Each structure stands twice: as C-alpha cells, then as structure tokens.
Image (spheres, helix red, strand yellow):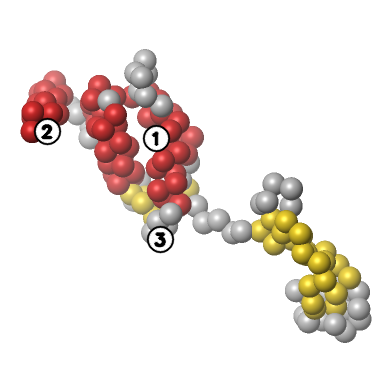
Amino acid sequence: MKCPVCGCTESKVVDSRPSADLSNIRRRRECLACKHRFTTYEVIETVHPVVIKRDGSKEPFDKNKLYVGILKACGKRPISAEAIANDIELSLAGSLNHEVTSAELGEMVLSRLKEQDPVAYVRFASVHREFGDVESFIREIRKLQQRDKDE
C-alpha cells in the first residue's frame, strides 16, 4: 500500500475489521516513514465466467438471462427456475474454467431439467437444440420414455 501523504510503500496494519455484511475488510495502516495513518479496504476479487456464443462472440455470464430462459421452459410446471439458475451459477463459480460455451450451459440446464420435469426438459431442448420439426420432438420424447423404462 502506498502512503497517501509521502508515497512510501512500506506500512504496517494497526487494526483490521470485517464489514457488517462480511463482504470486505477494513484495515487501518500506519506508514513506516512518516507515521501517517490511513484506511484501506480489502475486497475479494470475483471473476465472472464468460459465455462463448454459437457465433464465437463472447459475453459475460448473466444469471438473469439464464433464469429467464429456464423460466420460459418451466412455465406452469412445479419446479423452481431460480433454484436451477442458482445451482448452475454456483457450479460455474466453483469451476476453474472461466469460459463456458452456450452449448455447455444449455446442456447443464437440460441435465437438471431432465431429472426434475420431462415437460420442461422437452420445452427447453426444443429451443436449445433448435428442433425444426415435429419428428424432433417425438425422438426426444421417445428417448425420455426409453430412459424411464430402463430405470
């Protein structure tokens, strides 16, 4: 830390306290050269994942955008779109990889929907996998039925 008075880079921490919401730490420092005391704040730097779109462009991960997409698939279904979006966000935050493709993100949603609600799963899959005809829906439903029989 650089002293705001003399510019010296050597200081010692005199007092340290977490903020009320525990999002940062307030530190009182004393310059070793001029003895001036000053306050600094230490915050955890968060790295937000980047989503690589189908066209190759990149954009920051937006949980709200993911939530809206899941919500559309879950309309009038007994599952929580918010819980799925939160789960995926936590999964991405815990990952060492800071880039994820939109296809991988879609598959993460599909795997969670497949476990919870087959109707929401087919709805989301129809958009994510770009179903072009009724036959695509029928194939996906047959896969789900076969999975249920195998279990």
- Label 2 vs label 3, nearer the camera: 2
The residue type indicated by label 1 comes to: Ile
The residue type indicated by label 2 comes to: Glu
Does the residue at mark 3 contact the one at mark 1 (Cβ under 8 Å)? Answer: no
How far is the residue under mark 2 from the one under mark 3?
A: 33 Å
Please state the total of marks drawn on the protein image.
Answer: 3
Q: Is residue 45 left or right of residue 63?
A: right
Residue at the spot 70% in from the left edge and 62% down from the top edge: 42
Q: Closest to the observer: 85 or 5?
A: 85
Q: Earlier in the sequence, mark 2 or mark 3?
A: 3
Quadrant including the C terminus: top left
Q: Earlier in the sequence, mark 2 or mark 1?
A: 1
Residue at which label 3 appears: 96
Residue at the spot 29% in from the left edge and 29% down from the top edge: 116
Q: Please state the horizontal and vertical placement of residue 64, each as a whole percent of the image.
A: 49, 35
Q: Earlier in the sequence, mark 3 or mark 1?
A: 1
Please rate how many residues cluster around mark 3, counting C-alpha atoms within 10 Å: few if below 14, some from 14 to 19, many from 20. Answer: few
Q: Please state the horizontal and vertical placement of residue 34, each as a whole percent of the image.
A: 91, 81
The residue type indicated by label 3 comes to: Leu
Residue at which label 1 appears: 84
Q: Is residue 96 left or right of residue 140?
A: right
Residue at the spot 34% in from the left edge and 18% down from the top edge: 77
Q: Is residue 34 above or below residue 124?
A: below
Q: Please state the horizontal and vertical placement of residue 40, each as a whole percent of the image.
A: 78, 64
Residue at which label 2 appears: 151
Residue 126 occupies quadrant: top left
Q: Is residue 27 above or below residue 142?
A: below
